[in-house]
Amino acid sequence: MVKTNSIKSLTLLFNGIIILLSPVWFILLDYLGWLSTISTIIMVFYTANIVSFFICLAVMENQ
């Protein structure tokens, strides 16, 4: 039980960091001129991360 909870909190922490850093990544990619090329992939990645973040949050709340 402790092991699954620690894995969940690590996932939550990782996703939270990624979500918080997303504006930084967008600014950096825009500055490098790569935004138009890979913005779709990044948007899909961040959307999936945000969804999994909230799913993890809901699962942790239920326990």
Image (spheres, helix red, strand yellow):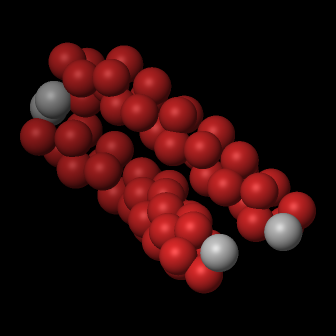
Report whether residue 9 is seen: no
User: Which residue is at a point 34% across and 58% down the rendered structure image?
Assistant: 24
Q: Position of residue 32 (x, y in %)?
A: 11, 40
User: Which residue is at a point 53% across and 76% down the rendered structure image?
Assistant: 3
Residue at the outermost left position: 32
Rendered-image quadrant of the C terminus: bottom right
Question: Is 42 rendered above or below residue 24?
Answer: above
Left or right of residue 28: residue 55: right
Residue at the outermost front position: 1
User: Which residue is at a point 24% across and 38% down the rendered structure image?
Assistant: 30
For residue 45, what is the image quadrant?
top left
Left or right of residue 34: residue 61: right
Q: Position of residue 60 (x, y in %)?
A: 76, 66
Question: Is 38 rendered above or below residue 32?
Answer: above
State the residue in front, 52 or 22.
Answer: 52
User: Which residue is at a point 24% across and 23% down the rendered structure image?
Assistant: 38
Q: Position of residue 57 (x, y in %)?
A: 73, 60
Question: Is 20 rendered above or below residue 44?
Answer: below
State the residue in front, 5 or 12.
Answer: 5
Number of marks: 0
State the residue in front, 17 or 9.
Answer: 9
For residue 5, what is the image quadrant?
bottom right
Q: Position of residue 47 (x, y in %)?
A: 54, 34
State the residue in front, 10 or 34.
Answer: 10
Residue at the outermost bottom position: 2
Left or right of residue 40: residue 49: right
